[in-house]
Amino acid sequence: MMVMKFGGTSLGTPQRIEQVSDIISRTYRTQAKLAVVVSAFGGVTNQLIDAAHRAASGDTRYEAELAQLESRHLDAIQYLLPAPGQTDARTFFMTELKNLFDVLHGVFLVRELSPRVLDFVMSFGERFSAYIVAEALRHRDIPAYYLDARQVVRTDARYGAARVDYDVTYNAIQNVVHSRNGLPVITGFIASTANNQTTTLGRSGSDFTASIFGAALDATEIQIWTDVDGVLTADPRVVPQAFTIPELSYEEAMEMSHFGAKVIHPRTMQPAMERNIPIRIRNTFRPEQPGTLIRRTPAPSPFPIKGISSIEHIALVNVSGSGMVGATGIAGKIFTALAQHDINIILISQASSEHSICLGILPGHASRAQEVLKKALKLELLEKTVGAIEVEENRSVVAVVGENMRRTAGIAGQIFSALGQAAINIVAIAQGSSELNISFVVERTDLPNALRVIHHAFFNGKGGEVAHG
């Protein structure tokens, strides 16, 4: 069993859907068993969210948004299906569209949009997409069938980012898929509670759906088809010499994604990791490329690092004071206070003298974090145990990632030497005991140059050679 997932960029136009159908058709002829997960057509989820908020604010332009959605999906049906096969597809679509219109009309009348209703509204994008792709495949003589993931993926009622009940979900998936012949085309991103209320799985939810189905069906491989060749050694918009990384471990991929590489979300890998299922990132528009394979034990790399990731804009919160040396409980107060206010910490750096703790957070949370910590450490500030809580804006974090770093001496020296020669100042440094990642903070204006000089230092201009080798 192989699971293939296609994102919104891969399904942006009828012509792109046709390309996806070609890829699925070729794979189906060589793969004994196959399941396909799809996102909504590119941009549709955002359009549904926009229409819902317009309706809630009393803006009648939500109807124009629905008219655009209607036209776009009917055009796809007309382009992809022969005339005799269009009637059923149009009937399905128009029935679902009327349901969507009725819901948004209700939102418009009461001027209220709850998270539960918003999840239900967002679910229509994947439902439209999966049905149309399934019909397109059936008219290529592939025995595809539409599978609404809400029938099998069970979650709690945390709307917008629901948590999966894996045991119930895996059993339900196995019962449904194994009881039917053919190729299921599955709605990504959406699920339901035990009471059949529609939920969504949050960011990269369709990738997560593919991983859930792959784990439930004991897939040999999960393929994530997107608009890039795989995971690259650096951001190619900044580092033109960046090339595709052939293989990564799960841990390396998670580190890369945590620090800005958006090809795959860490949560997507969890079900696959538990069942030791490889994940492959491939490009819908360059299917001849092998992509990046993510698995437990990747093939050896000739380089000491695998890649360089970054977050362009962060803020630093510095808690410092001479009284902190040897004082117990201060770090606990800091982390508890921020967690209670849903402020996520990206990076932690602490001096060995315990004189200061430096935290990297998203810039939008900086002022609130400072106020939260002033309240949490009010007594320590009065007693001068803590001298200051300061915020530094316009910083960037760079992460150098690779399992080979554990066995290679001098990596940190090479990084800092390259940055020093380029006159790039390092504001803060963090490294875990696993030695899988060295992270450091620089001025935001220095980020592009930092990425380029480190890439050159470790890959030595060999990007083109490796990419084509």
Image: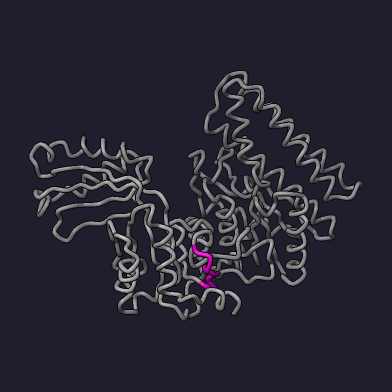
In the rendered image, residue 62, in percent from the top left (x then y), is placed at 66, 27
The tally of labels here is 0
User: Which of the two residues, 109 or 95, is positioned nearer the viewer here?
Assistant: 109
Q: The N terminus is located in which quarter?
A: bottom right
The residue depicted at 68 percent of the width and 54 percent of the height is: 10
Left or right: 77 in relation to 338:
right
Image quadrant assignment for residue 308:
bottom left
In the rendered image, residue 322, in percent from the top left (x then y), is placed at 9, 50
In the current view of this chain or complex, which residue is farthest to the top?
109
The residue depicted at 13 percent of the width and 59 percent of the height is: 353
Image quadrant assignment for residue 464:
bottom right
In the rendered image, residue 460, in percent from the top left (x then y), is placed at 45, 76
User: Which of the two residues, 359 or 414, is positioned nearer the viewer here?
Assistant: 414
User: Which of the two residues, 372 or 268, is positioned nearer the viewer here?
Assistant: 372
In the rendered image, residue 355, in percent from the top left (x then y), is placed at 14, 53
From what the image shows, is residue 381 above or below residue 20? above
Q: How is the image coloured?
A: one colour
Left or right: 113 in relation to 304:
right
In the image, the segment drawn in magenta is 239-247
From what the image shows, is residue 425 above or below residue 241? above
In the current view of this chain or complex, which residue is farthest to the right?
84
The residue depicted at 52 percent of the width and 63 percent of the height is: 272
Magenta highlight: main SS: loop
The residue depicted at 66 percent of the width and 22 percent of the height is: 60
Q: The C terminus is located in which quarter?
A: bottom right
From what the image shows, is residue 247 above or below residue 78? below
Q: Is residue 5 magenta?
A: no
